[in-house]
């Protein structure tokens, strides 16, 4: 075997890549490809920890050892920046969330005869892998899978997919079931019994006419800093507590002691409420439910947070508005924030904390900021979707 047979890196979709550019399914850096095409294991392989690995689409990289997994997350960010010819002062080592830390998941279910499968879809398939173990989910959420499977045996339509959304809130687990049929007294009682028996914070269903809350003993909340936010059903949260903490810490470092900060694409307040102590914060968000939740929480806490329901894609803050702030926090969806970034590039804002779930759109936006006179001081890769190819990050830009 030659050096050309050596797996050097993992591609964005999880394949190993040799020195001559061949993509090899299941390859890990340090493996070699034998003449017959089989893989000769190298030092960076790990034994998968789940019986479903290889079929379930929830994980792609359980066969990769911890160090190589962290390198993959970091290399995804560094590679995206290099592709746009963006120089960063530092691309830091990746921070990985631990196993059994996912506090949020969207699963699928299918009832066929007397059998009901609940789990992630198989890779590149609509087939549902019936979840009998999961090293990703926090134990409190995984413990609900069996009872949900039994519940869906009575309210899931035959051979029609059902969405199962789980999330951990301050008061306990939230369960949202979509495309179910819960008609009649028996179904209503079964839902109430299920929610009460498992101490749910909220149970909501959608039978095709919109979401209906079935169980909610008290307003469910999630806490950002010292402030509790009453969140709408399956409100967007960071996938793990460790990942959220890493991103908040990076944002705090990036904005420093700026007395006035804008949080754009603020959601329900993950960053705005976590950094508001001792400073004024303006928070803008296009999703009405999220900004109403943030507004209510800030008002109850008498925090110095001004909120605005604003579509930043159609109506970004212009440079004259941005110049009022000592720092800007930017946390857009996967597509990035090109129009808002163009206004930032023309502004005089001293520091920008950019949080992203897509290294490619981050690198594209970073190129615009650098062309406007900013420098990229550092980037912190975060792997909170453990064993997957999904990578997040936070970066600091400054003038």
Image (cartoon, helix red, strand yellow):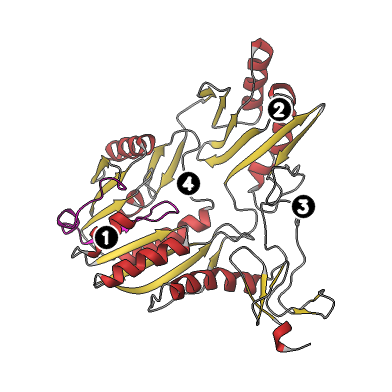
Q: CA distance from mark 3 to mark 2?
A: 22 Å
- Answer left or right for 163 relative to 290: right
- The residue closer to the viewer here, 98 or 121, is 121
Q: What span is colored magenta in the figure? A: 312-337
Q: CA distance from mark 4 to mark 2?
A: 26 Å
Residue for badge 1? 342
Q: CA distance from mark 2 to mark 1?
A: 48 Å
Q: How many marks?
A: 4
Residue for badge 2? 152
Q: Which mark is residue 278?
A: none
Predominant secondary structure, magenta span: loop
- The residue closer to the viewer here, 241 or 367, is 367
Q: Which mark is residue 237?
A: 4
How packed mark 3 is, by other alpha carbons closer than 10 Å (few <14, some 14-19, many 20 or more), is some
Residue 154 location in percent, x, y? 73, 22
- Answer left or right for 28 relative to 321: right
Classify mark 2: helix, strand or loop.
Answer: helix
Could you tell me if residue 366 is visible in this image?
yes
Q: CA distance from mark 4 to mark 3?
A: 26 Å
Classify mark 4: helix, strand or loop.
Answer: loop
Say which label, 3 or 1, has the lower sequence index.
3
> Does the stretch in magenta take in 242?
no
């Amino acid at each position: 075997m030659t050096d050309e047979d050596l797996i050097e890196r993992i591609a964005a979709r999880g394949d190993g890549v040799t020195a001559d550019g061949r993509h090899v399914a299941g390859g890990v850096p340090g493996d070699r490809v034998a003449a017959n095409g089989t893989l000769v294991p190298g030092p960076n392989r790990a034994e998968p920890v789940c019986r479903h690995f290889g079929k379930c689409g929830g994980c792609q990289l359980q066969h990769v050892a911890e160090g190589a997994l962290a390198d993959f997350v970091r290399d995804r960010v560094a590679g995206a920046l290099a592709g746009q010819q963006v120089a960063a002062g530092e691309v830091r080592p990746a921070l990985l969330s631990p196993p059994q830390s996912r506090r949020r998941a969207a699963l699928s279910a299918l009832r066929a005869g007397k059998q009901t499968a609940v789990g992630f879809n198989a890779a590149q398939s609509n087939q549902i892998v019936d979840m009998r173990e999961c090293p990703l989910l926090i134990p409190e959420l995984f413990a609900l899978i069996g009872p949900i499977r039994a519940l869906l045996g009575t309210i899931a339509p035959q051979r029609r997919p059902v969405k199962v959304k789980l999330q951990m809130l301050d008061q306990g687990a939230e369960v949202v079931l979509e495309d179910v049929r819960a008609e009649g007294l028996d179904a209503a009682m079964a839902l109430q019994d299920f929610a009460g028996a498992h101490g749910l914070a909220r149970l909501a269903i959608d039978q095709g006419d919109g979401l209906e809350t079935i169980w909610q003993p008290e307003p469910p909340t999630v806490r950002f800093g010292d402030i509790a936010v009453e969140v709408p059903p399956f409100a967007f949260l960071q996938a793990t507590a460790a990942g959220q903490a890493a991103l908040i810490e990076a944002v705090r470092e990036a904005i420093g002691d700026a007395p006035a900060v804008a949080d754009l694409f603020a959601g329900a307040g993950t960053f705005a409420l976590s950094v508001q102590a001792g400073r004024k914060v303006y928070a803008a968000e296009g999703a009405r439910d999220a900004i109403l939740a943030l507004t209510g929480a800030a008002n109850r806490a008498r925090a110095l947070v001004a909120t605005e329901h604003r579509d930043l894609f159609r109506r970004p803050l212009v440079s004259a508005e941005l110049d009022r702030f000592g720092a800007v926090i930017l946390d857009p969806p996967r597509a990035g924030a090109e129009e808002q970034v163009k206004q930032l590039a023309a502004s005089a804002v001293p520091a920008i904390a950019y949080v992203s779930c897509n290294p490619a759109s981050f690198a594209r936006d970073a190129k615009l900021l650098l062309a406007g006179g900013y420098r990229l001081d550092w980037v912190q890769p975060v792997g909170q979707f453990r064993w997957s190819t999904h990578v997040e990050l936070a970066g600091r830009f400054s003038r």
